[in-house]
Image: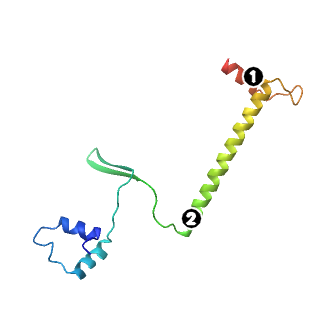
Amino acid sequence: MEQDPFIKGLKERLPDDLKDSFTKEQLMALKVAFGARQWGQHPLDLRGTFKLWRWRYYFVLLAGRNRRDLSRTERNLSRAATAASLAVFLLMCTVLGLLALYLIKSALGINIFPNFSFGIWGWFKDTMM
């Protein structure tokens, strides 16, 4: 019980004459009442205040790895976001790959359709040369 982070932190904040006055049941009740929440360190922890006219405002920006268990809705949203991100990534790679192939084809002077051009090669030559 003395190794519990909540109990340890509580006793560190108490005055010396009260540290050992609690029973185990009281300490456990305090732990349950306060939730024994250890927030931990975050890779991004930005906090501050600013004054705007008569009032002071605060802001907090925390970011880090999510270690919580996700609900079913959160898992489904996460899967959908992952699938959408992968689809966008693959689409962008495909478009860039096709553009690179088109530029290479045009640089080599290969015309697949006679008298037809998208105009990309001309634009590319004008901007790069």
Q: Is tag 2's residue or tag 1's residue first in the polypeptide sequence?
A: 2
Q: Residues within 10 Å of mark 1 (few under 14, many from 20)?
A: few
Which residue is found at the position 25% from the left and 47% from the top? 54
Residue at the spot of label 2:
75
Give the SS element for disc 2. helix
Compared with 98, 18 (above or below) is below
Tally the marks.
2
Which of pointers 2 and 1 indicates the residue nearer the eye?
A: 2
Q: Is residue 56 above or below residue 10?
A: above
Q: Is residue 24 left or right of residue 122?
A: left
What residue is rendered at 68% in x and 42% in y? 93
Kindly identify which numbered label has been placed on residue 28.
Answer: none
SS at mark 1 in the image: helix
Left or right: 101, with 60 as reference point = right
Position of residue 91 measured from the top left corner of the image (x, y, whole percent)? 69, 45
Q: Which mark is residue 122?
A: 1
Q: Is residue 49 above or below residue 32?
A: above
Left or right, residue 42 beside residue 4: right
Residue type beneath disc 1: Gly
